[in-house]
Image (cartoon, rainbow, N blue to C red):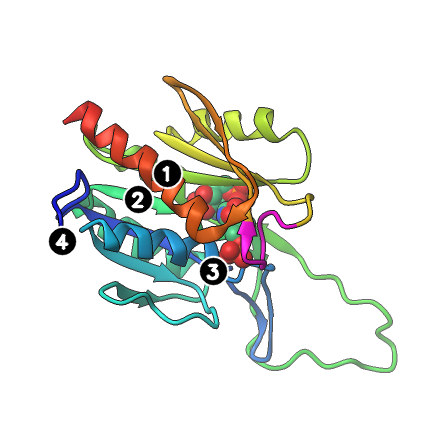
Amino acid sequence: QPTTPLTGKKVLVTAGGTRERIDPVRFITNDSSGKMGYAIARELQQRGAQVTLISAPTKLDVPAGVKLVQVLSTEDLAEAVTSAFPSADILVMAAAVADFKPLVSADQKIKKTADNDELVLKLTKTTDILKTVAKLKQPQQITVGFAAETQHLIDNATKKLTNKQLDLLVANDVSKPGVGFNGDTNQVTILQADHAPIKTALANKATIAKQVVDQISQRIQKEG
Ligand code: PMT
């Protein structure tokens, strides 16, 4: 394998949609298939990085040479990321993380009864993993977030770049056909505080992954 700026770099990639338990047989999740995160993990591995994929449940095969850590809930993911982050060079958060979880997860299956026509499910905020990571971040570490938006893509994504103190923010407008969740294609705008936005064409997720990893690689070259 040729040497690249990513050779030997320790990278954490998260993927998939987290699951928040309602009761033993039900959970809240989202449409993430994991394809975007897995494509990024594969691309980084092919460029010589030492990749750990922290994944919520998906139907995908783990890319060759990539270490898999399986998680279910946002709190599991938060624990896996924050414990591995101090010894990582790069973190890429492609996982679709629940912002809210049930306040209580019932021990037994919730039953419907004759006098219950409505059920109120109370939700509470989950841990913001990237905000937690921002507090642990050392200057040489690179953090990459995603933003899944349905409106005001660049405004909302720029706020996430700043608030979560990220080096790179990959913004996708998931209201557009072929973009974001589930499918094999994506179209993104890569934001960086010190760089003009880079808008990609609609392309398969492997191609998008290459473009994201190119930017990570260029940052390493600039800073190294
Ligand atoms: O998996 P696929 O089907 O291929 O779909 C790809 C994708 C749409 C899931 C992916 O491209 C994507 O946009 N991932 C991020 C989805 C998301 O959670 O976006 P967000 O805008 O809600 O969150 C912003 C960032 O904060 C994300 O990097 C997220 O991982 C992170 N986050 C969110 C919530 C939380 N509690 N902690 C976090 O760290």
Mark 3: secondary structure: loop
For marks 1 and 2, the one nearer the N-term is 2
Label 4, label 1: how many angstroms apart (C-alpha)? 25 Å
Say if disc 3 is inside 8 Å of ligand 1. yes
- Which part of the image, by quadrant, shows the C terminus? top left
Viewer-nearest of labels 3 and 2?
A: 3
Count of numbered circles on the image:
4
Nearer to the camera, 86 or 88: 88
Task: Say whether marks 1 and 2 touch (CB < 8 Å).
Answer: yes
Label 3, label 2: how many angstroms apart (C-alpha)? 16 Å
For marks 4 and 3, the one nearer the N-term is 4
- Label 3 sits on residue: 34
What amino acid is labelled 3 in the image? Answer: Gly
Label 4, label 3: how many angstroms apart (C-alpha)? 27 Å
Viewer-nearest of labels 4 and 1?
A: 4
Say if disc 1 is inside 8 Å of ligand 1. yes
Image height of 110 relative to 217, above or below: below
Mark 4: secondary structure: loop
- Label 4 sits on residue: 1
> Magenta residues, as a range?
178-185
Whether the magenta-drawn stretch holds residue 19 is answered as no
- Label 2 sits on residue: 91
Q: Main secondary structure of the magenta part?
A: loop
Mark 2: secondary structure: strand
Task: Say whether marks 4 and 2 touch (CB < 8 Å).
Answer: no
Q: Could you tell me if residue 105 is visible in this image? A: yes
Query: Which residue is pictured at 53% across the width and 30% down the height?
Result: 157
